[in-house]
Image: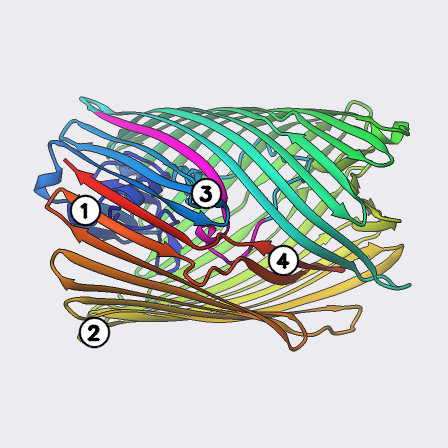
């Protein structure tokens, strides 16, 4: 076992996601910094630098303001200008699943003046979610906008760490390289992962209907095999007078899922869900005479998403195949001018989108309503004026994007042209170095997702069918938000608060209809409005006397929406709030303590009829004890208390312990036992707009693992 710098989760600073993660000033990993935080040993890190209001593009300094922070890892001298290699291998036994355990890792790093490399190999079957380490936290949504129509997936367990619930056999290899050239940097990244995951669950789904509730029961057992291969090649020049970046990347995924179910409708299902994606992004920014900026960008994306679902039941066999492809292109130019605290910019360009989808349904009874041959394409010309005004400590930003689009649907829907305008205004006020106030408001009109154009039915799982719309619709929305941030670095106080209110208006409403054990989702032409109110706040304080800190957070949300169930309109109001606390301390040299508490409760009211409030509570505690410089003992526990129904609770207490012995500077031995009380099931209840879902899931049983860690 080795002790890594951190965890493979998204890093946030004062509630905001960071915009860059550097190692010795270089962006080796991009948004995949989980590889570094999980792999770099803490004793190789000399310092963690936080760069507030970090603008990653030097050419935009003084022109475009950033309110996000960046992290820069400074390594100790012993970890630089040489290869740093460490690894661990563990073997043990598990009670559930019954059998042999293993956990291994090799991590190699070279941080040199002109070259950087991080290469890692991991393999385990003890619940470590390896693909999560290569997640790109900084990438946005794909412009191809393809989503799997097949909704088949293995049962998961919300709230709990995957280390408690993931029954896996996994392997991951990742290599990341950066070369510093005379002009710029060149980066190459390749990742491959394999996962074999099994899961089982006992589920009870209750649909709330006017003529009496409908209850569906099922016991599910499934296996998923997934392979993922990704590669990215990047060239970047980042100077004060110019910025050039070209990134070519590809993602190829192969997923196969098999699920067997008994209960109301016994069946077996198999889904093949490959995904092929290719993207190239190019951007060049040139700055003239310190006040003029010219930008050219080009984005091209292609994706293919074939999907096959096969269902076997006592009534017969059914097969759904869907072939879906999309290509997206965006070419633009922009000009920015800065004068006396005013920044004026105009971006203009074209967008193109080509998408085809065809579905073929084979069953014991087939109609034309279960076939789709669709093309949804558009061509857009757009312009986006932007005004920024800086006066002392106030920054105001006005965005005025407008566009004209022409849509073609190959007779599935009538072709048409549309214009859109979505202005927004934002103000940032920083009265002093401690307070920051941010206000924003916007409104707009936009097209619906073209993915919704689907006249025929599609089978998404063994008892669910979905139909899209056969008309073109536009939607409108409004939103306002306000946030406040406070920091007093000398006293170690940090606080944030946010309030968001939004409204959306769509000319269609989702409709749900049950036919025996089967459920059908479609859309009605009835108008539907929804509202959302969200508020959150947190405050943190460093505790120097305890060499730690405390943070208290809370949030509230209220969502109003509308749909049609069994041909009757249903208005639902979902309300939830939660409060949490985290505390960490190092009161004495040989003791570290981490504690967290989270309490949440929610309620769903339909057509004015309230339902019971259901709550959940989670406590976690970790003690790290170092009685001797060569010994370390960790005790970690989690307690969950979930309200299954009114005044009916389920409790779960999970406890781990780990002992570490430093045999030498380069060799460590450890032994750990997880889930000491051998808790093997976990129950919870969740609510959607017109249904409830009660489930019992498997947990990993008691485990014992012995590991050896070696460092070069």
Left or right, 142 with respect to 9, comes to: right
Q: Secondary structure at mark 2?
A: helix
Left or right, 168 with respect to 522, comes to: left
Range drawn in magenta: 156-179
Q: Quadrant of residue 308?
A: top right
Q: Position of residue 411 (x, y in %)?
A: 82, 24
Up/down of 661 relative to 591, above or below: above
Nearer the N terminus, badge 4 or badge 1?
A: 1
Q: Are marks 1 and 3 in contact (CB under 8 Å)?
A: no
Eye-nearest disc, 2 or 4 = 4
Measure how far apart labels 2 and 4 are at the Cα level: 41 Å
Eye-nearest disc, 2 or 1 = 1
Up/down of 528 relative to 169, above or below: below
Q: Viewer-proximal residue, 74 or 475?
A: 74
Q: Secondary structure at mark 3?
A: strand
The residue shown at (21%, 51%) is 49
């Amino acid at each position: 076992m080795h002790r890594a710098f951190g965890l493979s989760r998204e890093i946030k600073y004062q509630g905001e996601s960071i915009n860059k993660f550097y190692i010795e000033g270089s962006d080796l990993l991009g948004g995949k910094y989980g590889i570094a935080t999980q792999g770099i040993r803490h004793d190789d890190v000399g310092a963690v630098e936080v760069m507030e209001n970090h603008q990653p593009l030097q050419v935009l300094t003084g022109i475009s303001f950033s309110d996000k922070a960046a992290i820069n890892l400074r390594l100790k001298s012993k970890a630089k200008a040489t290869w740093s290699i460490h690894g661990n291998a563990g073997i043990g036994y598990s009670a559930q699943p019954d059998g042999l355990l293993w956990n291994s890792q090799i991590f190699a790093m070279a941080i040199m003046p002109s070259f950087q490399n991080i290469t890692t190999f991991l393999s385990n079957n003890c619940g470590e979610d390896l693909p999560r380490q290569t997640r790109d936290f900084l990438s946005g949504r794909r412009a191809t906008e393809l989503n799997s129509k097949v909704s088949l997936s293995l049962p998961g367990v919300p709230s709990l760490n995957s280390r408690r619930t993931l029954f896996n056999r996994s392997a991951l290899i990742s290599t990341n390289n950066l070369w510093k050239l005379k002009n710029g940097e060149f980066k190459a990244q390749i990742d491959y992962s394999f996962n074999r995951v099994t899961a089982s669950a006992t589920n009870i789904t209750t649909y709330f209907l006017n003529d009496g509730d409908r209850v569906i029961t099922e016991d599910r057992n499934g296996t998923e095999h997934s392979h993922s291969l990704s590669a990215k090649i990047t060239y970047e020049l980042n100077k004060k007078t110019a910025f050039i970046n070209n990134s070519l990347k590809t993602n190829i995924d192969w997923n196969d899922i098999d699920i067997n179910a008994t209960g109301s409708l016994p069946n077996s299902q198999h889904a093949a869900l490959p995904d092929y994606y290719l993207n190239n992004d190019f951007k060049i920014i040139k700055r003239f005479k310190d006040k003029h900026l010219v930008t050219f960008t080009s984005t091209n994306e292609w994706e293919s998403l074939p999907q096959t679902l096969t269902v076997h039941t006592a009534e017969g066999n059914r097969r759904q195949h869907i072939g879906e492809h999309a290509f997206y292109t965006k070419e633009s130019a922009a000009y920015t001018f800065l004068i006396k605290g005013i920044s004026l910019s105009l971006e203009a360009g074209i967008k193109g989108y080509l998408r085809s989808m065809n579905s073929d349904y084979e069953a014991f009874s087939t109609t034309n309503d279960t076939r789709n041959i669709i093309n949804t394409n558009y061509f857009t010309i757009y312009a986006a004026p932007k005004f920024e005004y800086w006066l002392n400590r106030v920054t105001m930003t006005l965005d005025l994007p407008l566009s004209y689009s022409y849509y073609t649907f190959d007779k599935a829907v009538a072709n048409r042209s549309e214009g859109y305008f979505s202005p927004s205004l934002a103000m940032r006020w920083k009265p002093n170095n401690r307070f920051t106030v941010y206000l924003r408001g916007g409104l707009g009109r936009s097209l619906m997702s073209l993915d919704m154009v689907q006249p025929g039915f599609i089978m998404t799982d063994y008892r669910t069918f979905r139909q899209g719309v056969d008309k073109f619709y536009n939607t409108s929305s409004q939103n306002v938000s306000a946030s406040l941030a406070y920091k007093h670095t000398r006293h170690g106080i940090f606080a944030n608060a946010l309030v968001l209110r939004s409204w959306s208006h769509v000319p269609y409403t989702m409709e749900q209809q049950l036919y025996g054990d089967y459920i059908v989702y479609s859309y009605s032409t009835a108008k539907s409005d929804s509202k959302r109110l969200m508020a959150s706040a947190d405050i943190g304080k460093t505790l120097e006397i305890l060499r730690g800190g405390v943070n208290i957070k809370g949030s509230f949300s209220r969502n109003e929406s509308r749909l049609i169930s069994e041909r009757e309109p249903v208005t639902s109001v979902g309300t939830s709030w939660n409060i949490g606390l985290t505390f960490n301390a190092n009161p004495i040299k040989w003791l570290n303590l981490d504690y967290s508490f989270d309490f949440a409760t929610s309620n769903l009211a339909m057509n004015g009829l309230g339902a019971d409030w259901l709550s959940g509570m989670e406590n976690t505690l970790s003690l790290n004890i170092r009685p001797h410089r060569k010994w370390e003992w960790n005790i970690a526990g989690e307690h969950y208390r979930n309200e299954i129904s009114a005044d009916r609770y389920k409790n779960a207490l999970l406890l781990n312990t780990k002992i570490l012995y430093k045999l030498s500077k380069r060799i460590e031995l450890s032994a750990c036992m997880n889930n000491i009380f051998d808790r093997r099931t976990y129950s919870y209840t969740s609510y959607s707009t017109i249904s409830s879902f009660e489930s019992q899931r498997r947990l990993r049983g008691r485990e014992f693992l012995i590991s050896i860690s070696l460092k070069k």
